[in-house]
Image: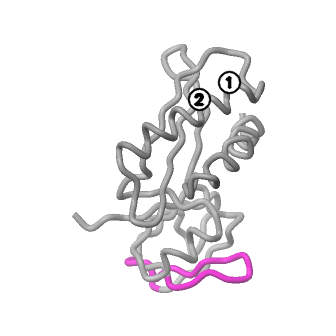
Amino acid sequence: MINKTKALEELLTPAADCENIEITDLEYVKENGNWVVRVFIDKDGGVSMDDCEKMSYVFGEVLDAGGILSDSYVLEVSSPGINRTLKKKKDFERFIGEKIRVKTFTSVNNQKNFLGELVWHKDGKIKINDVTSGEVEIDFSDIKKANLEADI
């Protein structure tokens, strides 16, 4: 599934780039017997409902012509929300100084869940000032999931 997800993102990215839209995340999952292509988009200043509607049409056309999906599917396009997923190195660069939540595959300093300010990213690592254990360096390859943590 990861390869199909990656192929879908590679197929849709040029269309997004043409509209000055960034694909922040893409999921291809089976839910309740239906395949769902879920695309999260963003742009400078944030995305509107009109942006999501327009990109749904654009992505639908590209997916239908792309030949990657042989099964029927539901396409969902939305903003990444306030707890935006961080996946790419540029995401970590963009959100330095922000509060993030990170889950790791393996224990780092005897823990797998971290919450705190993103201090920096470099050399394949991030540093987070964790609320429990202070400053911790985590390899990108060890990050299972990372997202912004909104203060509500």
Task: Look at the image and give the residue range highlighted in magenta.
Answer: 119-134
- The alpha-carbon separation of the residues under discs 1 and 2 comes to 6 Å
Tell me: residue 112, above or below residue 4: below
Q: Secondary structure at mark 2?
A: helix
Residue where numbered disc 1 is placed: 64
Asked if the residue at tag 2 contacts the one at tag 1, i.e. Cβ–Cβ closer than 8 Å, the answer is: yes
Q: Would you name the residue on which mark 2 appears? A: 60
**Position of 69 relative to 110 (above/below):** above
Q: 119 or 80, which is in the foreground?
A: 80
Residue at image x 67%, y 49%? Answer: 13
Compared across the picture, whether 6 is left or right of 53 comes to: right
Query: Residue 107 occupies which quadrant of the picture?
Result: bottom right
* Dominant secondary-structure state across the stretch colored magenta: strand
User: Residue 81, position in %: x, y?
Assistant: 38, 53
User: As drawn, is 78 to the left or to the right of 66?
Assistant: left
Residue at x 40%, y 77% (from the top left corner) = 132
